[in-house]
Image: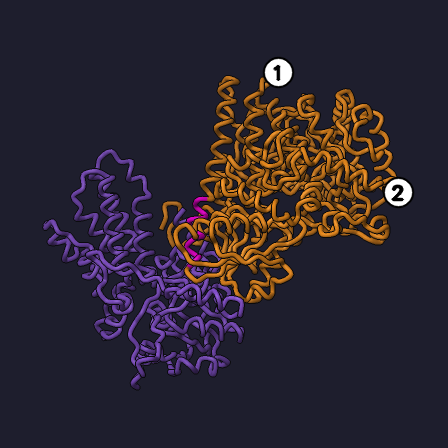
Chain colours: A purple, B orange
C-alpha cells in the first residue's frame, strides 16, 4: 500500500526488504511447538465436544459457583512433588470446555500460589511473575490469556496483604483473593447475560457471528425469559463454528437461520442487532475477534444497525492495534475442499480487529459500556 | 477487579466534569494584590491563582502587552532557507547535539548570554547579537508614522495611553528612538509604584463589583441582562461582560447562606479548579490596565483581523536591545527569568518542552538567589515574586498550556511548604521539586513515550511528520537506532520552516527522508502509513492544540485512512475544552507571512505596506478535533483521545502535587 507512488519504486529496489511479518522468536522450553495458534486449537477441541455433558458443565459454571472450584486441581493434589509445572496445571484446567482460557490461567496461577514453597512475599511474587510469564509465552496469540494473567497478578498483589507481618497469613490472603478472582471470572458470563436482556426485545432478529460462549449464554437466558426472537447465524468458516451454534440454538427451540459468511450484507436489512463475542477488547475500545467480525460491523454500521459485543472483563488487554496488521498474527489451517495450486497464497489469520467507531456497546461484567469507557477501565486497572 | 473498585457489576457513580477538589483550605492565607478576585476585605485572603498574574497562569490566558513575533521575522527574513554555507554550519553543529532538542545541554546553548556569538544557537540570527542590528534596521526601514495615525482613528484610547507613557521612558529610549515610535520601554521605578497603587484601588473596585455580581446572580433574576455591564470602551464587548461573572457565580449561590468568610473561601477553592478566563484584548479598559504595569512595552499592530481582535497582536518591535541592556539594572525581575523572557520574545527558544524547561530552570535560579525580606512570610512573598515573573514572561510571549501547568505545580509546591522549614531548607526543597518535575514529567515521560511509540513503527513503514516536535524526533532516531527500516516524510510550512531543523538532524543520522511543504500534503499522504504529530496541549474533549497546519495534516491523513498518532507528555493535558482555534490562539508577526524570503531585499510596495483593506493573519496554533486522532501516546501508555479526561481526572492531583 505504501509503495504505490512512482517515486518510491527506486527505494523498493534498493532495499531488499525482508517480509515485515515479525515472527515470534522460537525457543524456550515452554514454547508452543506448532505455528498454529494454540488458542484456536483449544477452541476447536472444545467445539468438537459440545454435548449434553458440555452443556451441563456450562450450566453448572454459570448457575452459581459449583463445587468444582473448591476441588483442588489434580496437579495441586500431587503438588508435593517439586516439579510443579504451570503449563500442565493450565492444560489440566483448559480441558474443561466451559472454562475460558483466561479463567484456566487464573486457576493455574492460584495453584502456583498454593504449591509455592516460598518463604517471603518477594519470593512468592517473583515465582508468580515467572509462572505467568511462562503461561504467556506458551501461547502468545491468545489475548485473553495474557490479559487474564496480567489482571490476576495485579489483582492479587495489589493488596494490603503485602503488609502482613506473618507470611502465612499474607499467603492465605493472596490465595483468598486468587479464589475470589476466579469466582468473579466464572460469574462474569452470567452477569453479562443478565445485563443484555434489556436489549433483546420481542420480535427482533439477531445476527450472530461465530460461536461465543457468552453470546450463547445471552441467547439462552433470553429464551428462558420467554423472549421471542429469531437468530441468524453465519457459517463461521473455516471451522464451522456458526453451524455448531445454530445446532445449539435449535435445541433450545430458538428459530435459527444459517447464512453463508458472504451473505451478511444480503440479509442485513432484516437484522435488528448484531451480537458478537470477543477474543480481546483493546485499549481503543475496539475488539479483536474471529475473522469476519470487522466485515459484519462495517456492513451493520453502514446500515445503521447496532453492534453489541459481549466480553468478560478479563479479556480487556492493554493493546492498541492501529490497523489489521498491527497484531501478532494467529494462524490456523484452512481447508478449502478443492486442491489449491502451490503458488497460491492463503490468508490464514484467524482474527481481525474491529475499530471502536463501528461498535455500539460492549456488554461486560463491569456493566454496559460504550467503547471509550474501555480505556477508562483499563487505565484504572493497570495504572 | 481492583482494590479501588467496588464490587463488580455495581454501577459506579463517577464524578464527571469539573468537580471541586476536596482540598483542605489553604491554611495560612496570604493577602494578595489581587486584581479581579472578589476578595473580601476582611479576610483579605486569596489563593494563589487569584493574584494578578495568577490570573494569567491558566495556560490559555493571553496576557498583557507582549509580543513574540519578532522571532518570526528575524528568523524568517535572514535565514529562512539557509544558503549552503549556513546549512553546513548547522549540520556541523547539529551533529554534536543530543537526541532531544530540549535536553538541558541543548537549551543551555539556546540560553547563551546576549553577548555570545550566534554560532551557538540553532536558529542563528535570532540571537541578541544579530537581533539588535536586525530589528533596529527593520524598524527604521518601516516608517510607521502613518500607521499610528490610522490607529489613532481606530483606537484613540490606546493611542493616548501610549503617548502618556512616552515621557516617562523617554530618557532610556534615546538610543533606539530611530523610528520615533513609542514602543520598547522599561517603565521607571517610580512609575511602577504609582501603578501598583492604582492597581490596588482598582482591585477593591473589582471586588466590590464582583460581590455585586454574585448577589445579583443569587437573585437569579434577569440574569443575562443584569450581569451585562455597559462597557466604557466604545465597542460593546459581550466576551468580557458574560465571561467574568460566570466564573464568580459558580461558587457563590450555593453557599450564600453560610457566613461571608466561608463563602469566599469555598469560592476560592472552586475558582482554582475552574479554568480562568483569558484576557480579552478587545476590551479596552482591561488592556489599558494591563499596559500600565507592563515591563515590556509593545505597539499594537494596526490592521488586525476582525475575528481575532481578542488576541494580542503587536508590531515587531525594536525594544529588544533596550530590554536586553536592562538585564541587570532591573531589580523586580531576576536576571535569569529576564533572560528567558527575552529569549521567548526573540524566539530563541521555541518548542513547548524547551520553553517550559527554560522557564523552570530560571525559576530555580531565582529561588536560589531569593531572600525573604524582613517581616515577610516566605510563601507569601515568594508567590508574589513568582507571579511577577510569570506576568513578565506573559508579556514576552503568552504562556503555553504546559508552562501554565508547570507554574501551577510550582505554586502548589510553595503553598505546601511546611511552616517550620527554614528559608534555606525551603529553597532547597523547592529547587529539588522543580528539578524533579523536569526529570519526571518531561525527561522520563519522553523516554516512556519513545518506548511505546517505537512499537508502532514496523519495517517498511513510511512515517509522516509535520513541523518539528522533539518527541517525534526522539522516536524516529530511536527507531533508527534499533534497526527499524523505515522512511520519513517531513512536511513543513512557512514561515517558521521548523521541519528543516528536523530534516537536518535526521539526515545527519542517516535516516531516509523526504522533505516537502504542506501544499503537497494530499499527494504525499498516499505514501504514508503512519502520521506522527507533536502537541502543544491536548484538551479534555480530545482536541489537539498544536502548531498551525497540524489539523490539516490530520484531516488529510484521516481521509486517506492513515492512522494519526499524537505524542504528548501528560503534563500538557488540560482540563479545559476547546472547540475551535479562534477562542484561544496566538498571533504571530503578520510581516512574517507577508515577506517572501527570496525577495527579502525588495521593498514591499506601498499598497502592501499601508493598506487598510489588507490584513495579515499569522496564526500560531490550530485545534484538531479528536475524531481525526487515532491514538495518543503519553507517559501512561497508548490511549485513545477519549481518555484524556480519565488521565486528567485520575492524575491531576498527582500532577499538581507530584
Relative image position of residue B431 (x, y in whole percent):
51, 27
Label 2 resides on the chain identified as: B
| Residue found farthest to the top | B374
Tell me the quarter of the picture where residue A97 sits. Answer: bottom left
Q: Give the mark toward the camera: 1 or 2.
A: 2
Tell me the quarter of the picture where residue B286 sits. Answer: top right
Residue B455 belongs to magenta span: yes
State whether residue A156 is above or below residue A280. Answer: above
In space, the residues marked 1 and 2 are separated at their CA atoms by 48 Å
Looking at the image, tell me whether mark 1 or mark 2 is earlier in sequence order.
Answer: 2
Q: Secondary structure at mark 1?
A: loop
Horizontal relation, residue B348 to residue A365: left or right: right
Q: Which residues are magenta?
A: B447-458
Residue A55 makes an appearance in the image: no
Relative image position of residue A62 (x, y in whole percent):
29, 64
Q: Secondary structure at mark 2?
A: helix
Relative image position of residue A332 (x, y in whole percent):
30, 72
Q: Residue at x 74, y 48 (%)?
A: B600
Residue to which mark 1 is pinned:
B373
Residue to which mark 2 is pinned:
B146
Count numbered badges in the picture: 2
Residue A315 belongs to magenta span: no
Amino acid at each position: 500500500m505504501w509503495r504505490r507512488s512512482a517515486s518510491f519504486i527506486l527505494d523498493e529496489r534498493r532495499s531488499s526488504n525482508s517480509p515485515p511479518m515479525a515472527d515470534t522468536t522460537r525457543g524456550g522450553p515452554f514454547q508452543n511447538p506448532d505455528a498454529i495458534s494454540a488458542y484456536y486449537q483449544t477452541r476447536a477441541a472444545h467445539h468438537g465436544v459440545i454435548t449434553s455433558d458440555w452443556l451441563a458443565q456450562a450450566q453448572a459454571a454459570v448457575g452459581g459457583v459449583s463445587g468444582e472450584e473448591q476441588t483442588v486441581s489434580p496437579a495441586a493434589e500431587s503438588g508435593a512433588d517439586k516439579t510443579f509445572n504451570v503449563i500442565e496445571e493450565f492444560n489440566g484446567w483448559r480441558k474443561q470446555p466451559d472454562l475460558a482460557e483466561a479463567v484456566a490461567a487464573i486457576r493455574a496461577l492460584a495453584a502456583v500460589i498454593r504449591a509455592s514453597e516460598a518463604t517471603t512475599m518477594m519470593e512468592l511474587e517473583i515465582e508468580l511473575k515467572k509462572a505467568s510469564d511462562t503461561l504467556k509465552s506458551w501461547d502468545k496469540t491468545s489475548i485473553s490469556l495474557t490479559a487474564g494473567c496480567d489482571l490476576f497478578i495485579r489483582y492479587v498483589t495489589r493488596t494490603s496483604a503485602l503488609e502482613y507481618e506473618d507470611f502465612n497469613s499474607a499467603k492465605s490472603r493472596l490465595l483468598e483473593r486468587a479464589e475470589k478472582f476466579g469466582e468473579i471470572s466464572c460469574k462474569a458470563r452470567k452477569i453479562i447475560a443478565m445485563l443484555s436482556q434489556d436489549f433483546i426485545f420481542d420480535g427482533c432478529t439477531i445476527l450472530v457471528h461465530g460461536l461465543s460462549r457468552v453470546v450463547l449464554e445471552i441467547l439462552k437466558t433470553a429464551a428462558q425469559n420467554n423472549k421471542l426472537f429469531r437468530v441468524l447465524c453465519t457459517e463461521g468458516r473455516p471451522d464451522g463454528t456458526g453451524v455448531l451454534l445454530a445446532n445449539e440454538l435449535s435445541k433450545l427451540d430458538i428459530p435459527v437461520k444459517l447464512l453463508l459468511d458472504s451473505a451478511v450484507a444480503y440479509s442485513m436489512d432484516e437484522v435488528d442487532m448484531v451480537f458478537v463475542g470477543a477474543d480481546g477488547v483493546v485499549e481503543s475500545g475496539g475488539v479483536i475477534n474471529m475473522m469476519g467480525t470487522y466485515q459484519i460491523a462495517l456492513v451493520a454500521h453502514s446500515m445503521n444497525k447496532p453492534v453489541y459485543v459481549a466480553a468478560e472483563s478479563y479479556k480487556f488487554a492493554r493493546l492498541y492495534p492501529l490497523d489489521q496488521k498491527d497484531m501478532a498474527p494467529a494462524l490456523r489451517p484452512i481447508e478449502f475442499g478443492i486442491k489449491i495450486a502451490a503458488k497460491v497464497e492463503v490468508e490464514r489469520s484467524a482474527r481481525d480487529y474491529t475499530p471502536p467507531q463501528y461498535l455500539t456497546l460492549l456488554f461486560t461484567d463491569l456493566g454496559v459500556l460504550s467503547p471509550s469507557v474501555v480505556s477508562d477501565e483499563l487505565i484504572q486497572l493497570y495504572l | 477487579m481492583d482494590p479501588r473498585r467496588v464490587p463488580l457489576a455495581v454501577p459506579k457513580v463517577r464524578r464527571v466534569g469539573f468537580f471541586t477538589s476536596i482540598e483542605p483550605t489553604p491554611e495560612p492565607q496570604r493577602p494578595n494584590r489581587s486584581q479581579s478576585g472578589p476578595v473580601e476585605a476582611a479576610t483579605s485572603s486569596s489563593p494563589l491563582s487569584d493574584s494578578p498574574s495568577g490570573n494569567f497562569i491558566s495556560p490559555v490566558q493571553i496576557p498583557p502587552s507582549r509580543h513574540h513575533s519578532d522571532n518570526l521575522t528575524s528568523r524568517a527574513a535572514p535565514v529562512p532557507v539557509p544558503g549552503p554555507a549556513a546549512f553546513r554550519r548547522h549540520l556541523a553543529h547539529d551533529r554534536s547535539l543530543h537526541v532531544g532538542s530540549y535536553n538541558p545541554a541543548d537549551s543551555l546553548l539556546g540560553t547563551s548570554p546576549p553577548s555570545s556569538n550566534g554560532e551557538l544557537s540553532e536558529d542563528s540570527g535570532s540571537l541578541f547579537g544579530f537581533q539588535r542590528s536586525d530589528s533596529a534596521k527593520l524598524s527604521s526601514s518601516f516608517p510607521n508614522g502613518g500607521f499610528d495615525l490610522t490607529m489613532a482613528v481606530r483606537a484613540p484610547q490606546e493611542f493616548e495611553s501610549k503617548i502618556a507613557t512616552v515621557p516617562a521612558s523617554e530618557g532610556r529610549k534615546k538610543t533606539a528612538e530611530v523610528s520615533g515610535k513609542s514602543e520598547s520601554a522599561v517603565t521607571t521605578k517610580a512609575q511602577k509604584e504609582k501603578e501598583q497603587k492604582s492597581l490596588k484601588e482598582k482591585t477593591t473596585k473589582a471586588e466590590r463589583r464582583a460581590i455585586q455580581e454574585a448577589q445579583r446572580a443569587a437573585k437569579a433574576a434577569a440574569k443575562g441582562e443584569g450581569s451585562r455591564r455597559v462597557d466604557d470602551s466604545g465597542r460593546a464587548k459581550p466576551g468580557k461582560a458574560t465571561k467574568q461573572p460566570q466564573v464568580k457565580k459558580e461558587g457563590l449561590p450555593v453557599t450564600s447562606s453560610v457566613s461571608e468568610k466561608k463563602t469566599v473561601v469555598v469560592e476560592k477553592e472552586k475558582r482554582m479548579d475552574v479554568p480562568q478566563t483569558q484576557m480579552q484584548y478587545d476590551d479596552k479598559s482591561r488592556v489599558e490596565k494591563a499596559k500600565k504595569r507592563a515591563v515590556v512595552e509593545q505597539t499594537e499592530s494596526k490592521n488586525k483581523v476582525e475575528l481575532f481582535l481578542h488576541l494580542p497582536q503587536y508590531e515587531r518591535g525594536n525594544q529588544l536591545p533596550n530590554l536586553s541592556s536592562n538585564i541587570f539594572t532591573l531589580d523586580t525581575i531576576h536576571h535569569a527569568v529576564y533572560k528567558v523572557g527575552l529569549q521567548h520574545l526573540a524566539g530563541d527558544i521555541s518548542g513547548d518542552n524547551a520553553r517550559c524547561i527554560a522557564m523552570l530552570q530560571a525559576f530555580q535560579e531565582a529561588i536560589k538567589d531569593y531572600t525573604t525580606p524582613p517581616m515577610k512570610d516566605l510563601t507569601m512573598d515568594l508567590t508574589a515574586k513568582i507571579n511577577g515573573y510569570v506576568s513578565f514572561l506573559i508579556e514576552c510571549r503568552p504562556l503555553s498550556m504546559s508552562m501554565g501547568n508547570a507554574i501551577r505545580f510550582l505554586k502548589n509546591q510553595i503553598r505546601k511548604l511546611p511552616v517550620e522549614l527554614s528559608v534555606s531548607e525551603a529553597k532547597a526543597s523547592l529547587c529539588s521539586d522543580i528539578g524533579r518535575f523536569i526529570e519526571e514529567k518531561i525527561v522520563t515521560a519522553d523516554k516512556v513515550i519513545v518506548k511505546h511509540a517505537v512499537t508502532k513503527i514496523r519495517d517498511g513503514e513510511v512515517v509522516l511528520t509535520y513541523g518539528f516536535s522533539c518527541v517525534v524526533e526522539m522516536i524516529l532516531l530511536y527507531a533508527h537506532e534499533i534497526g527499524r527500516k523505515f522512511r520519513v516524510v517531513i512536511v513543513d510550512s512557512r514561515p517558521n520552516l521548523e521541519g528543516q531543523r528536523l530534516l537536518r538532524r535526521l539526515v545527519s543520522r542517516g535516516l531516509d527522508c523526504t522533505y516537502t511543504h504542506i501544499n503537497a500534503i494530499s499527494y504525499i499522504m498516499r505514501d504514508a502509513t503512519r502520521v506522527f504529530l507533536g502537541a502543544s496541549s491536548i484538551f479534555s474533549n480530545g482536541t489537539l492544540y498544536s502548531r498551525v497546519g497540524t489539523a490539516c495534516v490530520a484531516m488529510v491523513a484521516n481521509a486517506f485512512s492513515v492512522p494519526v498518532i499524537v505524542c504528548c507528555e501528560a503534563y500538557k493535558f488540560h482540563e479545559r475544552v476547546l472547540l475551535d482555534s479562534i477562542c484561544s490562539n496566538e498571533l504571530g508577526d503578520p510581516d512574517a507571512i507577508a515577506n517572501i524570503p527570496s525577495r527579502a531585499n525588495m521593498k514591499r510596495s506601498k499598497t502592501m505596506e499601508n493598506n487598510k483593506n489588507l490584513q495579515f493573519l499569522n496564526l500560531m496554533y490550530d485545534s484538531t478535533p479528536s475524531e481525526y486522532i487515532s491514538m495518543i501516546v503519553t507517559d501512561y501508555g497508548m490511549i485513545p483521545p477519549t481518555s484524556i479526561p480519565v488521565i486528567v481526572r485520575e492524575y491531576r492531583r498527582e500532577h499538581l502535587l507530584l
